């Protein structure tokens, strides 16, 4: 995947370049002169909290209720540090309330670890985008929200047909929720897998794709049924399996290795792999692209692997 960085030509000293820092997806570099010192301090504090949450997400065990209690205990431990400011304690209290909403959100209930990592990323991205300490406080209130997951509410806020550049500007929580959307695209464009990998399509577009299935299996970490139509990774979420059963009155087809299939679903560009656990990384290592069909909304087997073997 080609990545192009455009910079306006202007005389910039080496010192000025080194003084500039950015947050992107949890990575932190110190900011230089000209930035409000109180904002710098709060960014540093939020970076620490984000790393604590990300680390805790990899240690979560049990059912979602137990995970919520584990996260709340961790947040309380962070609050006890004598260096915490009143503003930071307010953020931690908000986070503690936020994680209690996991059981009431399908994506939080089914993917508590990934939801926690999305919140951690949101902390650092929001800090990066703030221009002052006051602005940061306002942004945290609006950005640290877990939207209701009923289909109508979600589709009012989930964007469609975005360029990759516009997609990356969305907040991590929204980006995470997009791969758990439950709506059906208005239409499906027939595509070739290689063309999606080459970036010829936008994010959040309904597509139809044909190909041979490989590496089909359940992923125990979040209950997704995953498979590849090389070079594209495809995922059927628990939410979509349940919806398909409800509206079609039958289970959604889950293909086997070697099946020739036609699938429909949403295009997605997965920015989150660098935060994954070692178990999750095993699924992504060696992939030629992080473009995906996620969620898959329908699978039709055109020729099963068993038919192929009989011949």
Image (spheres, rainbow, N blue to C red):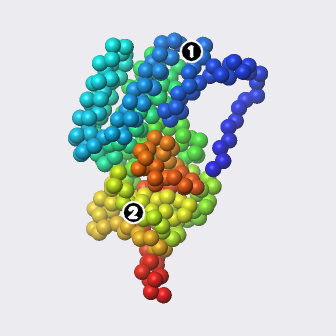
- The crowd level at tag 2 (other Cα within 10 Å; few <14, some 14-19, many 20+) is some
- What residue is shown at x 63% (from left), y 19% (from top)? 19
Quick check: can you spot residue 193? yes
Residue bearing the label numbered 2: 217
Q: Position of residue 174 (x, y in %)?
A: 43, 40
* Residue at screen point 33% across, 17% down: 81
151, 36: nearer the viewer: 36
C-alpha distance separating marks 2 and 1: 49 Å
- Asked where in the image residue 97 lies, by quadrant, the reply is top left
Q: Check the image and report above or below for 204 versus 131.
A: below
Q: Residue 229 or 285: which is nearer the viewer? A: 285
Q: Mark 1 falls on what kind of element?
A: loop
- Is 90 positioned to the left or the right of 295 in the image? left
Look at the numbered disc 2 and give the secondary structure of its residue: strand
What residue is drawn where x is 27% and y is 30%? 72
Q: Residue at x 39, y 26 (%)?
A: 49
Relative horizontal placement of residue 149, taking residue 140 as reference (left or right)? left
Residue 139 visible in the current orientation: no
Quarter of the view holding residue 117? top left
Residue behind mark 1: 35
Q: Position of residue 89 (x, y in %)?
A: 33, 19
């Amino acid at each position: 995947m080609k990545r192009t960085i455009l910079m306006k030509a202007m005389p910039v000293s080496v010192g000025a370049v080194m003084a500039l820092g950015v947050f992107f997806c949890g990575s932190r570099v110190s900011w230089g002169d000209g930035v409000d010192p109180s904002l710098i301090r709060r960014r540093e504090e939020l970076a620490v909290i984000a790393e604590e949450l990300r680390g805790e997400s990899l240690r979560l065990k049990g059912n979602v209720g137990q995970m919520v209690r584990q996260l709340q205990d961790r947040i309380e431990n962070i609050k006890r540090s004598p260096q915490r400011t009143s503003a930071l304690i307010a953020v931690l209290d908000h986070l503690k309330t936020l994680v209690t909403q996991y059981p009431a959100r399908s994506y939080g209930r089914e993917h508590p670890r990934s939801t926690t990592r999305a919140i951690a990323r949101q902390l650092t991205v929001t800090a990066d985008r703030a221009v002052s300490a006051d602005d940061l406080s306002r942004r945290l209130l609006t950005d640290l929200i877990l939207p209701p997951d009923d289909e109508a509410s979600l589709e009012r806020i989930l964007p469609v047909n975005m360029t990759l550049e516009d997609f990356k500007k969305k907040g991590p929580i929204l980006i995470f929720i997009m791969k758990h959307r439950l709506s059906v695209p208005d239409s499906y464009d027939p595509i070739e897998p290689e063309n999606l990998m080459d970036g010829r399509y936008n994010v959040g577009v309904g597509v139809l794709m044909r190909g041979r299935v490989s590496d089909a299996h359940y992923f125990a970490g979040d209950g997704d049924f995953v498979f590849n139509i090389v070079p594209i990774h495809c995922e059927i979420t628990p939410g979509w399996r349940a919806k398909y059963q409800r509206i079609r009155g039958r289970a959604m087809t889950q293909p086997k290795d070697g099946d020739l299939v036609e699938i429909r679903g949403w295009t997605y560009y997965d920015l989150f792999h660098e935060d994954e656990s070692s178990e999750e990384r095993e699924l992504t290592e060696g992939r030629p692209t992080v473009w995906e069909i996620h969620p898959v909304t329908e699978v039709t087997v055109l020729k099963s692997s068993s038919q192929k073997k009989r011949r």
